[in-house]
Amino acid sequence: MQKDKLRLMGMKLKGMQIQILLRLDKFPDDWKNFEMPEEQNLKKG
């Protein structure tokens, strides 16, 4: 029973990861241009 629960959780997590990747594929240019504020500060400095 416990193993089945863990397997289901793993499948859910994998599904979420795939959804996120698909979303990123839809906006690849936005993602490339996206920078964390820390990265921008490093480039300025």
Image: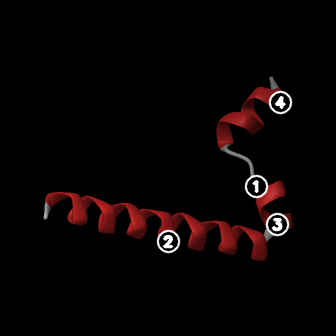
**Picture quadrant of residue 24:** bottom right
- Which of the pair 39/13 is nearer the observer? 13
Residue lying farthest to the left in this orientation? 1
Q: Residue at x 15, y 59 (%)?
A: 2
The answer to whether residue 6 is left or right of residue 37 is: left
> Which badge, 4 or 3, comes first in the chain's sequence?
3
Q: Amino acid at mark 4?
A: Lys
First of labels 1, 3 by sequence position = 3
**Sequence-wise first label, 2 or 4:** 2
Q: Which residue is mark 4?
A: 43
Amino acid residing under circle 2: Gly
Residue at left 41%, top 67%?
11
Q: Quadrant of the N terminus?
A: bottom left
Badge 4: how crowded within 10 Å, few (<14), some, or many (20+)? few
Q: Residue furthest top?
A: 45
Mark 1 surroundings within 10 Å by alpha-carbon count, few (fewer than 14), some (14 through 19), many (20 or more): few
Eye-nearest disc, 1 or 4: 1
Label at residue 28: 3
Q: Quadrant of residue 37?
A: top right
Q: Which residue is mark 1?
A: 34
Q: How far apart are the alpha carbons under marks 2 and 1?
A: 24 Å
Q: Secondary structure at mark 1?
A: loop
Secondary structure state at the residue bearing disc 3? helix
- Residue 35, percent from left and from top: 74, 48
Are the two marked residues, 2 and 1, in contact with CB atoms closer than 8 angstroms?
no
Q: Residue at x 49, y 69 (%)?
A: 16
Which mark is in front, 2 or 3? Answer: 2
